[in-house]
Image (cartoon, rainbow, N blue to C red):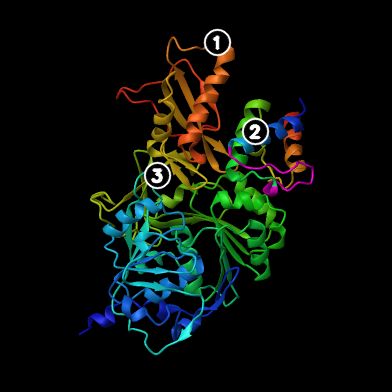
Amino acid sequence: MRTALLTKAPSLRQRVRDGFFRDRSANVRVADLVRGTSLRCRLPELAGKSVAIATGSQLTAGLALIELDGVARRLLILPPDVDPSHLPALFASAEIDAVVTDGETAAHPEFDLPLRVDVGAEIALTDRLPEPARDTEWVMLTSGTTGVPKLLAHSLAALTGAIKPAASNDLVVWGTFYDIRRYGGLQIFLRAVLGGASLVLSRAGEPIADHLDRLAQYGVTHLSGTPSHWRRALMSPDLHKIVPRYVRLSGEIADQTVLDSLRTAFPSASVGHAYASTEAGVAFEVTDGLAGMPQSYFDVDRDGVEMKIEDGSLRIRSPRRASHYIGSDAVLTDADGFVDSGDMLELRGDRYVFAGRRGGIINIGGLKVHPEEIEAVINRHPKVRMSLVRPKASPITGAIVIADVVLESGAAVEADEIGVVKGDILKLCRDTLPRHKVPAAISIVPSLDVAATGKLARRHKVQG
Amino acid sequence: MSVKLTIANQMAEIAREHGKTLAPLRDDTVLLDSGLDSLGFAVLVARLEDRLGVDPFTASDDAQFPVTFGDFVKVYENGAAH
């Protein structure tokens, strides 16, 4: 008869192999964690707890994740840009009773828990490592748009479902522009740890030139980022310093321009774009250098991942998906177990290409924007009757927002006053909205289409 | 107005709107050091499409991402000529 202990999957610490974590100020041999701790020997206190990872640096967050998997009941991974005003609600939902911080953690009352443990980039030998006793829940924030982000629980098995054993013994050095506390970056962290590869991480506010210098210095072979990260890197005079063998894009839709530019910049590298979401997990990777994906991806069950299109959007049934929401009644899958990605697909020739988001949600360099939020601000202007905010394709950030505005009849619409009204509206937006939500351009239009539902007619397509 | 001057004026305006300080623009000024960030350049490309009638990065099949201000101006001068 098998005992519960035997059926538990190996913890991340038990799967650590070789490799180094490096950032601007630290250089840590990961295998030292097999007999050591970065938690000042306080790991046993965290056993069975729900622990928030609230470090300032990615590197210390990575060390804490390795140590706490199999030990903590639950790990809440806080991304660096989490809105501090959401912390009380997030901590309550996730039933957080301990927090891991480092020297760079910003001050916040939520972090002052009785059980607060500091993690550092120094690993001390210890004989007090607790036995892994449970399958830890890994909890990530949805890249939400407005309000408190939702919490999604994953198992380590689901998070690592797309990671294949290393094909060769060639030295691999991973780099990521994507923070490892977001789903796309976490994939790279886990690939490095399980593959025994090194991982070069950036620090908050580090200029891209410095990051590229360090990637070059450590001989990065595999490098990952969103299309927006890559476009920024392609504008750097230092990009030629690195010679990766593998270039990966994920987190946003990769267009043909960025794929072609990467092919030109790195002629000997293989370039792949992966489709993944915090909800559905890693669904597939396309490596033929073309945007979109072959129609044939839908014909077969690929490594247990099934896909279909319903009402125009991509649906994914996958063992790699999140298991459930925490602290929310929201439903993750339909009755058949498919997650609706909200990404709309169109067939062009024999390929499916992405055609924007359902509900008009706009993705600006990885930041999701609800057009309604911006329209509400514009509509506060006394001369505005109604407005429609829509995406416009951008070669730099994937999309930007622009606004069509209908003025009140009777409002001054003399040609020379239109500029003034536009300026007023933009000022209103700038005063109330974060920069990426301020429309890049405003057009005054005579009318807007209203659908039969009485709502503004939103086309889901990104206008070119 | 020359393409170069239009671009420089737009960059100055966007820097002002975004509360950034624009570096003096020379042909060899590295765009990432100019003071505008990715969002600033996204807005710039959209505004230039309005002013100049072309988005050369999206229109062209072999667009290269520009590194310096001089490269950037050249992409638009070539794009406008087509």
Amino acid tagged 3:
Thr
Residue A64 place in picture, x, y as percent = 42, 72
Label 3 and label 1 in one chain: yes
Label 3 or label 1, whichever lies nearer to me, is 1
Query: Residue A127 in magenta?
Result: no
Label 1 and label 2 in one chain: no
Q: Spatial distance from mark 3 to mark 2, Cα to Cα?
A: 28 Å
Q: Check disc 1: other Cα within 10 Å, few if <14, some if 14-19, many if 20+.
A: few
Q: Check disc 2: other Cα within 10 Å, few if <14, some if 14-19, many if 20+.
A: some
Label 3 or label 2, whichever lies nearer to me, is 2
Residue A23 place in picture, x, y as percent = 58, 69
Residue B2 place in picture, x, y as percent = 77, 28
Residue located beneath label 2 in the image: B13
Q: Spatial distance from mark 1 to mark 2, Cα to Cα?
A: 24 Å
Amino acid tagged 2:
Glu
Label 3 and label 2 in one chain: no
* Main secondary-structure element of the magenta-colored stretch: loop
Residue located beneath label 1 in the image: A414
> What residue span does the magenta drawing correspond to?
B18-33
Q: Is residue A455 visible?
A: yes
Residue located beneath label 3 in the image: A145
Residue A327 place in picture, x, y as percent = 25, 55
